[in-house]
Image (tube, rainbow, N blue to C red):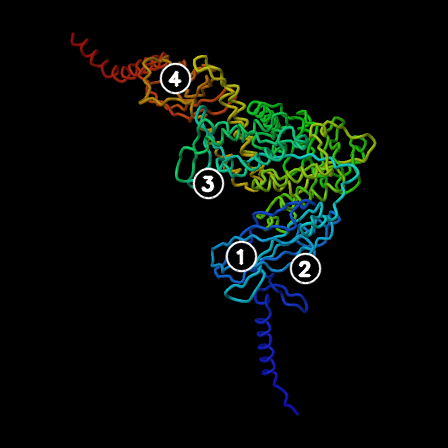
């Protein structure tokens, strides 16, 4: 029989076992709760990538019956690890054709099954760390065992896989890129063989409207009137705007796609409306006359003068006779401005945008349509825009909902009851409301890469337009109306942009789509008695707005500019209108609230601070000139002489405020006009009641109270006696005489008496 443990030994054994459990179970030692029957496990970290797969071309982008019988894939493999990689190989996988919006979304997210696998195409040689290796190979579309085995037309999910063997470990999957491959028709499997089946277009072509964005984040820094444009560069030796418009740059490619695929007069041209940021046009116009670049090393001359001139000339030729939609100046965040009560800046952003597009491109812009950031808007901003004669707004149908019952008779929806209805929705809560033009979110997400789990997949870096090409072909086959809107500042190469436009043109030629003009779509009113719709504003969009601290600073600067507008006047000698001086500052405020900074709030804060600094410098240009020494007042009623300097090119009305000082009473001088780039001596009537030193604070301001310059402390010296001072002095002297007499007379009186007695 086993002897029993003593109570002390049992207690020690229990303590030891408890300590072992405490140390063995993760999470207990850190004081974290552990679920019953399961120890806490931290989430696994994804392994660091060993290689990157970059696709540079896919031919054809959309397969037709006249295409080559094989799909050509071109790109390069980049070793991003610290290990050499050998046995590199690439193969393709294919899934079934998508047949619903949900299936397209799963394919875009990389969740579609891809059971068809081709043989591995080797990439020659080993790949050392940091090196890259190009590749190009062809994969037959059908007819042979190692082909993609595409049986019929449709839109297919395809995955390009990269395999290899690092010098540590065994063969493994290194990287992959998923994409959509549209197939309108199957080419012959072998030379001389008949072509395969062809995708039949819908009974009625799908109406297609394309909004083509030519925008860029504001890079212009504040400058004084008459100075050349100054461009910000965060990296030494770079010229960011010039890089975008130079041959091979992003904006060069987007404009080139417009010129090549849809020149004016082509069948697809009527469907395309060019969305332009007026701030970009203004910046390029200034750059074409010479500009400077400010980078961390200093300020240098810009290198893109000729490219700016050439790009603008090309754009003017490309938009002649075409729809042009002006964005708000600097693509200002209209919702943030509306929420901050800056409706005047909303109006200036839209009006200045239309004016600049008209002046710089020589076209009549489409001003009745607004394209809000993210295709979302709130009711307050919509009310502001409706007051500015907006008649149509591009919106995401996912952000529409039935209106309140009390106002259901005031709004209406036109279109099908499917998840993506045809465009045409009254979305305002008033009878004069704007029409909502419903953007296709499936296409927008495919082009932006936002349907991937991270929103930044490998496909977003490789052939970024390919998913949009596949989604467009899928949508065109449905016969429903399409409003195709790429991302606002689409990061895409010229070949990808041209590929998307060529796909739209091919679909039009094949009878899948028909061109529909944006102005005609915006002018059409929904039928009465249809379903209702109401704007909703997603919380995520609210969180992405320009921060309220930035709009608050913009509001303060706006108030100062409004006050300065009333204080400045045209000076005949300088011949500069005050608006020419102040309007650029107002537009600078809009650059600080650009939607480009929705994901970069620190840049919005920085720009707002720079604009405030420039405004402070303007206010300091009107100041009191400090005298070299104290003022001397020779008489009791000598006036004060204060000199005011105005370095601005316009006249300024100023008010002078003097602090109260004992012994000095200064009179009022009223408003004084100081001419442009000159000085004026102000004569202030004053009364001095005592002699000595005085200290008085002088401040300049506009008639509305905005401070000008810096407060100035003036030193005064008075050597004059005023009437009061003389009277006081005489009275004091008389009193002194009386006091002296009072003391002397009693002493003198006995002496006088003695003298009289002796006589």
Mark found first going from the N terminus, 4 or 2: 2
Q: CA distance from mark 2 to mark 1?
A: 29 Å
Q: Is residue 574 left or right of residue 552?
A: left
Q: Between residue 726 and residue 586, name the one nearer to us.
A: 586
Q: CA distance from mark 3 to mark 2?
A: 53 Å
Q: Are marks 3 and 2 in contact (CB under 8 Å)?
A: no
Quadrant hosting residue 484: top right
Q: CA distance from mark 3 to mark 1?
A: 29 Å
Graded by Cα atoms within 10 Å as few (under 14), some (14 to 19) or many (20 or more), the crowding at tag 4 reads some
Q: Is residue 452 left or right of residue 641?
A: right
Mark found first going from the N terminus, 3 or 2: 2
Q: Which residue is mark 2?
A: 145
Quadrant hosting residue 716: top left
Q: Secondary structure at mark 3?
A: loop
Give the image location of residue 239, x and y in percent. 46, 37
Mark found first going from the N terminus, 4 or 3: 3
Q: Note whether 668 is above or below 490 in the view shown.
A: above
Name the residue at 53% across, 57% down: 51
Q: Which residue is mark 3?
A: 234
Checking the image for residue 679, the label placed there is 4
């Amino acid at each position: 029989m086993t002897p029993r443990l003593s109570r002390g030994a049992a207690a020690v054994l229990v303590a030891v076992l408890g300590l072992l459990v405490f140390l063995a179970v993760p999470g207990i030692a850190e004081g974290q709760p552990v679920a019953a029957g399961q120890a806490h496990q931290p989430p696994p970290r994804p392994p660091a990538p060993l290689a990157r797969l970059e696709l540079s071309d896919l031919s054809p982008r959309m397969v037709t019956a006249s295409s080559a019988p094989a799909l050509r894939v071109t790109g390069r493999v980049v070793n991003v690890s610290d290990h050499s990689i050998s046995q590199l190989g690439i193969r393709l996988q294919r899934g079934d054709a998508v047949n619903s919006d949900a299936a397209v979304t799963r394919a875009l997210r990389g969740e579609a099954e891809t059971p068809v696998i081709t043989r591995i195409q080797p990439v020659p040689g080993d790949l050392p760390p940091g090196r890259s290796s190009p590749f190009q190979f062809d994969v037959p579309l059908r007819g042979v065992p190692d082909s993609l085995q595409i049986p019929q037309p449709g839109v297919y999910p395809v995955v390009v896989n990269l395999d290899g063997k690092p010098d540590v470990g065994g063969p493994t999957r290194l990287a992959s890129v998923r994409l959509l491959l549209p197939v309108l028709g199957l080419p012959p499997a072998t030379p001389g063989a008949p072509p395969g089946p062809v995708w039949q277009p819908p009974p009625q072509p799908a109406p297609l409207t394309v909004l083509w964005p030519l925008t860029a984040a504001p890079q212009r820094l504040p400058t004084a009137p008459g100075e050349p444009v100054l461009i910000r560069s965060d990296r030494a030796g770079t010229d960011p705007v010039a890089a975008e418009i130079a041959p091979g740059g992003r904006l060069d490619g987007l404009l080139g796609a417009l010129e090549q695929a849809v020149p004016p007069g082509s069948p697809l041209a009527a469907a395309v409306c060019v969305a332009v940021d007026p701030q970009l046009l203004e910046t390029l116009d200034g750059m074409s006359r010479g500009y400077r670049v400010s980078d961390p090393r200093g300020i240098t001359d810009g290198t893109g003068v000729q490219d700016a001139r050439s790009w603008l000339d090309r754009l003017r030729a490309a938009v002649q006779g075409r729809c042009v939609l002006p964005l708000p100046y600097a693509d200002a965040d209209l919702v943030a401005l509306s929420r901050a009560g800056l409706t005047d800046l909303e109006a200036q952003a839209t009006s200045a945008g239309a004016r600049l597009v008209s002046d710089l491109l020589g076209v009549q812009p489409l001003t009745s349509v607004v394209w809000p950031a993210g295709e979302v808007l709130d009711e307050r901003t919509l009310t502001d825009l409706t007051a500015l004669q907006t008649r149509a707004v591009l919106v995401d149908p996912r952000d529409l909902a039935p209106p309140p019952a009390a106002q259901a008779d005031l709004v209406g929806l036109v279109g099908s009851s499917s998840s993506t209805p045809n465009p045409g929705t009254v979305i305002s809560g008033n009878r004069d409301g704007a029409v909502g033009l419903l953007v296709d979110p499936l296409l927008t997400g495919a082009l932006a890469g936002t349907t991937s789990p991270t929103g930044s997949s490998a496909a977003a870096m490789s052939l970024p337009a390919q998913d949009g090409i596949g989604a467009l072909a899928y949508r065109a086959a449905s016969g429903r109306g399409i409003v195709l809107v790429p991302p606002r500042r689409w990061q895409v190469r010229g070949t990808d942009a041209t590929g998307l436009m060529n796909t739209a043109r091919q679909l039009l030629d094949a009878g899948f789509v028909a061109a529909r003009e944006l102005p005609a779509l915006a002018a059409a009113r929904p039928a009465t008695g249809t379903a209702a719709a109401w704007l909703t504003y997603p919380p995520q969009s609210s969180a992405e707005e320009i921060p309220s601290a930035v709009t608050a600073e913009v509001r303060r600067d706006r108030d100062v500019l409004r006050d300065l507008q009333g204080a400045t006047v045209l000076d005949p000698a300088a011949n500069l209108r005050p608006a020419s001086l102040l309007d650029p500052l107002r537009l600078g405020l809009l650059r600080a609230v650009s939607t480009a900074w929705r994901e970069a709030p620190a840049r919005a804060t920085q720009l707002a601070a720079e604009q405030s600094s420039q405004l402070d410098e303007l206010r300091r240009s009107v100041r009191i000139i400090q005298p070299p020494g104290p003022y001397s007042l020779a008489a009791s009623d000598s006036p004060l002489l204060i000199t005011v300097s105005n370095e601005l090119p316009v006249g300024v009305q100023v008010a002078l405020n003097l602090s109260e000082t004992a012994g000095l009473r200064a009179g009022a001088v009223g408003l004084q006009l100081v001419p442009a780039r000159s000085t004026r001596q102000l004569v202030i009537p004053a009364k001095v009641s005592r002699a000595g030193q005085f200290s008085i604070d002088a401040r300049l301001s506009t008639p509305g109270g905005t401070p000008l310059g810096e407060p100035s402390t003036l030193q005064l010296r008075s050597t004059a006696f005023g009437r009061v001072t003389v009277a006081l002095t005489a009275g004091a002297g008389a009193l002194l005489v009386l006091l002296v007499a009072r003391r002397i007379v009693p002493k003198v009186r006995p002496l006088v008496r003695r003298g009289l007695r002796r006589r």
